[in-house]
Image (cartoon, helix red, strand yellow):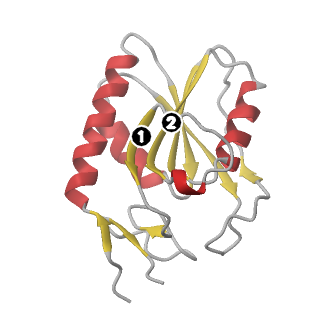
């Protein structure tokens, strides 16, 4: 199936460099912990850290709420938690897309209980049309329409992650 392009690889590359530059500026003389939300954000996180000019530590959290569907189930399940200590650390959560906000709110609240110094959110994509709970995105790549997006690490049933661009499933 041909996947229509929503955001080109070139635009993604430029935006990732811009986000990295802003994070590097905001965290100068700091050593933040980046928490990448798997599986969708691994490509974005890898490209983001390659452009950072500050020291960072990376860890990964795997969370599920989709259950092989195009709609969030609303039930959030931590499949893999981070290993890094969070207390008194500056945290940057790196996610692929903020949709309803339910998963993001759950992750933020879970991390807040561990008493970090700060928590910021960096998301490649923002889909405000589906938002159920308010979420502040500190570093936002692109706002997308209410379409099921794939590519650049984002999948549908483990397909399309390899696309260099963000596309959408027609229909």
Q: To which quarter of the image does residue 24 belong?
A: top left
Where 117 sits versus 15, above or below?
A: above
Q: Residue at x 67, y 39 (%)?
A: 82
Q: Is residue 28 left or right of residue 108?
A: left
**For the point 68% across and 53% down, which residue is it?**
63
Residue 60 picture location, percent across and down: 59, 44
Q: Position of residue 85 (x, y in %)?
A: 68, 25
**With respect to residue 22, does 30 lie above or below?**
above
Is residue 24 shown above or below 125?
above
Residue tagged by mark 2? Answer: 137
Residues 137 and 16: in front is: 137
Q: Residue at x 73, y 18 (%)?
A: 115
The N terminus lies in which quarter of the figure? bottom left
Q: Tell me if 161 is positioned left or right of 68 in this view.
A: left
For this orientation, the residue located farthest to the bottom is 1
CB within 8 Å, label 2 to label 1: yes
Horizontal side, residue 128 vs residue 164: left or right = right
Q: Which residue is mark 1?
A: 140
- Element type at marker 1? strand
Across and down, in percent, residue 44 comes to 40, 50
């Amino acid at each position: 199936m041909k996947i229509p392009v929503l955001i080109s690889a070139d635009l993604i590359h430029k935006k990732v460099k811009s986000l990295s530059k802003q994070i590097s500026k905001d965290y100068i003389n700091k050593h933040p912990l980046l928490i990448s939300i798997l599986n969708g954000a691994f490509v974005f996180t890898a490209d983001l850290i390659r452009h950072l000019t500050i020291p960072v530590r990376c860890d990964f959290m795997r969370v599920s709420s989709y259950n092989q569907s195009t709609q969030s189930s609303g039930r959030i399940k931590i499949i893999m938690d981070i290993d890094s200590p969070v207390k008194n650390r500056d945290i940057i959560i790196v996610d692929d897309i903020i949709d309803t906000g339910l998963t993001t709110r759950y992750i933020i609240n879970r991390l807040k209980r561990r008493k970090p110094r700060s928590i910021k959110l960096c998301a490649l994509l923002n889909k405000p049309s589906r938002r159920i709970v308010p979420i502040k995105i500190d570093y936002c790549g692109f706002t997308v329409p209410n379409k099921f997006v794939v590519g650049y690490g984002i999948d549908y049933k483990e397909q399309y992650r390899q696309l260099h661009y963000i596309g959408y499933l027609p229909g």
